[in-house]
Image: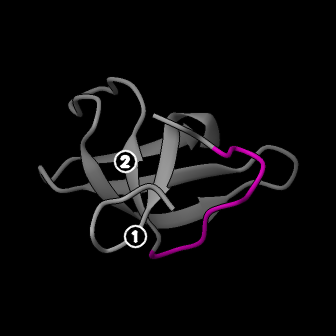
Amino acid sequence: MANSSGESLRRGDRVVANEDLIGVPEGSAGRVELVNGFRWKRYWVRFENGVVVGSIDRALLTRVNKQGVPA
């Protein structure tokens, strides 16, 4: 999946996992719940399967629109 890791995500953005995470298979959709960090931004994401994963690097997420198309 394409990734534009230069742009930050915001709380509420819809995302897709670019690779397998603990409890979350690649391609799973979710929503950013929390953004933290100054120099290195990390994201907490609640995925559709109910799993919440924290400290995810931006390179592992792709922003999508409401139709699930990469934005």
Could you say where residue 13 lies in the image, as x and y percent from the top left?
A: 47, 70
Was residue 5 drawn as part of the magenta stretch in this picture? yes
Q: Quadrant of the N terminus?
A: top left
The residue carrying pointer 1 sits among few (fewer than 14), some (14 to 19) or many (20 or more) residues within 10 Å by Cα, namely few
* Three-letter code for the amino acid on which mark 1 is drawn: Asn
Q: What residue is disc 1 on?
A: 65
Of badges 1 and 2, the one in the foreground is 1
Q: Residue at x 34, y 27 (%)?
A: 21
Which region of the structure is painted magenta?
A: 4-12
Give the image quarter of residue 9.
bottom right
**Vertical position of residue 17 compared to residue 11: above or below:** above
On screen, residue 27 versus residue 61, left or right, reads left
- The figure's colour scheme reads one colour
Could you say where residue 26 lies in the image, as x and y percent from the top left?
A: 29, 29
Query: Could you say which is closer to the camera, residue 16 or residue 37?
Result: 16
The residue carrying pointer 2 sits among few (fewer than 14), some (14 to 19) or many (20 or more) residues within 10 Å by Cα, namely many
On screen, residue 66 versus residue 43, left or right, reads left
Tell me the CA gap for discs 1 and 2. 10 Å
* Three-letter code for the amino acid on which mark 2 is drawn: Val
Main SS of residues in magenta: loop
Give the image quarter of residue 46.
bottom left
Q: What residue is disc 2 on?
A: 16
Q: Residue at x 40, y 70 (%)?
A: 65
Could you say where residue 32 lies in the image, as x and y percent from the top left?
A: 44, 64
Q: Earlier in the sequence, mark 1 or mark 2?
A: 2
* SS under mark 1: loop
